[in-house]
Amino acid sequence: EEDHITTASDMAKITAHAMKNEKFRQIVRTRVKPWEGKEWKSKLINHNKMLVSYQGANGVKNGYTTQSGFTLVASAEREGTEFIAVLMKADGDRQIYKDAIKLLDYGFKNYKTVPVLQAGAKISEGGERYRIRQNVYASIPKEDHFRVHVNGADGLIVETDSGVVREYP
């Protein structure tokens, strides 16, 4: 479809949402699955090279089309921190995997995931009181401290020494 356009940001958002589903997570991290067909036995093989070459890799998608070139949505988790790297329109799959490794390595080297609010917590700002429904985590620069603010229009804002990191509408 000529007007069908998907950005790296779109793919990251779709992946972040999909990774909340445990069945999806199980499927995308599976390397080999036996296939018991009516007429033959075979196996399904996941060709995502990250699953065998990168520590903590747990998915998600690799592919190629003439129009899009080589694409890769890679996810990895280490010590409670999970990152998603999205690469699109590469000329070759070797380079796309190298670039994904660089992106994920950068994330793990420079960021940490911290709990910023626990479910049930009550916070007040500007005369309004809010109760947190679920635990809230944020990935922040490793050396930074954070502050949490509530803004009725913007939702929850996690601000670090380096600046605003995340807004939760």
Image (tube, rainbow, N blue to C red):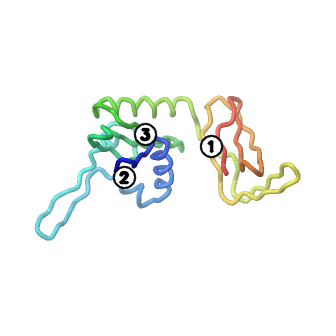
Q: Which amino acid type is marked by label 1?
A: Ala
Distance (Cα) linking label 1 and label 3: 19 Å
Sequence-first disc among 1 and 3: 3
Residue 16 image position (x, y, % from top left): 50, 50
Q: Which amino acid type is marked by label 3?
A: Val
Residue 100 image position (x, y, % from top left): 40, 34
User: Is label 1 in a helix, a strand or a loop?
Assistant: strand
The vertical placement of 91 against 58, above or below, is above
Q: Looking at the image, which residue sits at the far right?
A: 127
**What residue lies at 47% left-to-right and 51% top-to-bottom?**
14
Mark 1 and 3 residues: CB-CB less than 8 Å, in contact?
A: no
The vertical placement of 58 against 108, above or below, is below
Residue 61 image position (x, y, % from top left): 36, 47
Q: Which amino acid type is marked by label 2?
A: Val
**What residue lies at 48% left-to-right and 46% top-to-bottom?**
10
Task: Single out the mark in the foreground, 2 or 3.
Answer: 3
Residue 148 image position (x, y, % from top left): 74, 43
Sequence-first disc among 2 and 1: 2
Distance (Cα) linking label 2 and label 1: 24 Å
Q: Residues within 10 Å of mark 3 (few under 14, many from 20)?
A: many
Q: Residues within 10 Å of mark 1 (few under 14, many from 20)?
A: some
Q: Looking at the image, which residue sits at the far left?
A: 39
The vertical placement of 81 against 162, above or below, is below
User: Is label 2 in a helix, a strand or a loop?
Assistant: helix
Which residue carries the number 1 mark?
A: 138
User: Is label 3 in a helix, a strand or a loop?
Assistant: strand
**Residue 8 falls in which quadrant of the image?**
top left
Along the line of sight, the residue nearer the viewer: 24 or 52: 24
Which residue carries the number 3 mark?
A: 86
Which residue carries the number 2 mark?
A: 28
